[in-house]
Image (cartoon, helix red, strand yellow):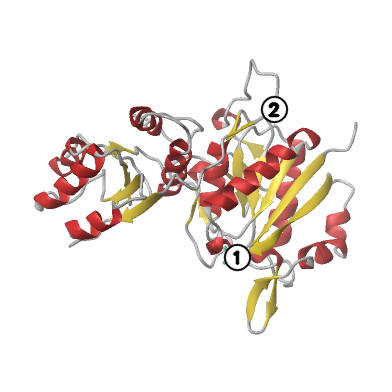
């Protein structure tokens, strides 16, 4: 059996950081030097791997949609040569990148595992070694035809994941979708929920990158939010907005101007998607008058999508030459396992 090969796209993040001048920062070559002297990374049961270090290495709050597209292009450029891909990334915006990659890479037959750590590999007590080694094993030896996020013993669907813990090793969860695998003594894939391997195509992945012109935003409602805050947000070049609402998708209705601002924006072609601030459950715009008023203003349901998935999906759809009606239809259609319609 030829040895399996994994491509590691090292974009930055805590996993490879070093403590310098009182804080952690990414240092080029540092992660590789730690791995080279750690016997765990030379173990014969690991696949062959290459590390492609990005320039500059980023602390992930500095990631932009252009960086998401750069990672997707990198994976596509090496797609045929490797059995799987690991993306090393900071945890802060990892769920956004994992979601964006899921949409940009169409027809994926090989695993793309996004991971990182809460404590860098250089520290004696760390979660970096386990996360990276398990990600390498999953990427090399398992048929998982989707973009996933691996962290602390659980493999999550990338476009369902959210960061839920700033301190613990259990930094990620996918509260509205079961894990794709549990990694304990055994690696147990939950095959029932994995995306199917694409059929009827002769291999290869298609890339639709996210364009800089696809400007989207997110606005989290709060009690007392004014129509002018909303109006300020809905200015050019904004083309799409994720409105993070209450409960089953509700927003204030006593302020008519608030609803008028929404209706004017949707009439002007801005796509406004309703996602709930709740971690579980789904948007249902028929349930309350405070929800149906949004539907009447032209806001569409994001159902149970995470705000991260909705934002990246909207940017990806607006990057394509599609009529607004089609963008709205696809936003409400399950494309990568990101959405469940009742
Ligand atoms: N600030 C870091 C980042 O997101 C945190 C981490 O990697 O855990 O890049």
Bin the neighbour count of mark 2 within 10 Å (Cα to Cα): few under 14, some 14-19, many 20 and up: some
Residue in view at x 80 percent, y 36 percent: 81
Percent of width and height locating residue 316: 48, 39
| Whether the residue under disc 1 has CB within 8 Å of ligand 1 | yes
The image shows a total of numbered marks equal to: 2
Q: Position of residue 301 (x, y in %)?
A: 30, 37
- Residue 204 circle label: 2
Q: Furthest-top residue in view?
A: 200
Mark 2 Cβ inside 8 Å of ligand 1: no
Residue drawn at the location 35% of the way across and 47% of the way down? 242
Q: Is residue 131 left or right of residue 94?
A: right
Query: Is residue 244 something that shows in the picture?
Result: yes
Name the one closer to the observer, 198 or 212. 212
Tell me the quarter of the picture where residue 328 sits. top left
Give the quadrant of the C terminus: top left
Which residue is label 1 attached to? 59
- Left or right: where 240 falls relative to 312: left
Q: Quadrant of the N terminus?
A: top right
Q: Quadrant of ligand 1?
A: bottom right
Q: What's the residue at 73%, 66% (across, down)? A: 121
Quarter assignment of residue 339: top left
* Dot placed on the residue nearer the N-terminal end, 2 or 1: 1
Q: Looking at the image, which residue sits at the far bottom? A: 21
Q: Is residue 127 visible?
A: no
Q: Position of residue 214 (x, y in %)?
A: 44, 44
Spatial distance from mark 2 to mark 1, Cα to Cα?
Answer: 31 Å
Q: Is residue 225 above or below residue 310?
A: below
């Amino acid at each position: 059996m030829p040895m399996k090969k994994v491509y590691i796209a090292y974009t930055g993040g805590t996993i490879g950081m070093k403590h310098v001048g009182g804080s952690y920062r990414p240092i080029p070559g540092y992660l590789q030097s730690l791995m080279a002297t750690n016997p765990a990374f030379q173990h014969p049961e690991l696949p062959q791997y290459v590390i492609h270090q990005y320039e500059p290495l980023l602390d992930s709050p500095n990631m932009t949609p252009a960086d998401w597209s750069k990672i997707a292009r990198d994976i596509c450029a090496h797609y045929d040569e490797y059995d799987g891909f690991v993306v090393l990334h900071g945890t802060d915006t990892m769920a956004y990148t994992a979601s964006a990659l899921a949409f940009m890479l169409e027809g994926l037959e090989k695993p793309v595992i996004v991971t990182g750590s809460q404590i860098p590999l250089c520290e004696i007590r760390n979660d970096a070694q386990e996360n990276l080694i398990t990600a390498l094993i999953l990427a090399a030896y398992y048929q998982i035809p989707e973009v996933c996020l691996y962290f602390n013993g659980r493999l999550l669907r990338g476009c369902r994941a959210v960061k839920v813990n700033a301190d613990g090793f259990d930094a990620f969860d996918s509260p509205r979708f079961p894990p794709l695998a549990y990694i304990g003594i055994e690696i147990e894939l939950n095959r029932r929920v994995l995306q199917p391997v694409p059929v009827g195509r002769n291999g290869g992945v298609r890339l639709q990158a996210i364009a800089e012109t696809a400007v989207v935003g997110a606005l989290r409602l709060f009690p007392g939010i004014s129509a002018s805050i909303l109006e300020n947000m809905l200015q050019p070049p904004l083309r799409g907005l994720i409105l993070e609402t209450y409960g089953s998708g509700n927003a204030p209705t006593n302020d008519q101007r608030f609803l008028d601002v929404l209706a004017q924006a949707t009439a002007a072609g801005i796509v406004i998607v309703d996602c709930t601030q709740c971690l579980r459950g789904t948007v249902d715009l028929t349930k309350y008058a405070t929800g149906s008023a949004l539907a009447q203003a032209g806001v569409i349901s994001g159902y149970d999508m995470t705000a991260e998935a909705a934002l990246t999906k909207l940017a990806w759809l607006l990057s394509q030459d599609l009529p607004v009606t089609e963008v709205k239809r696809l936003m409400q259609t399950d494309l990568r396992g990101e959405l469940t319609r009742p």
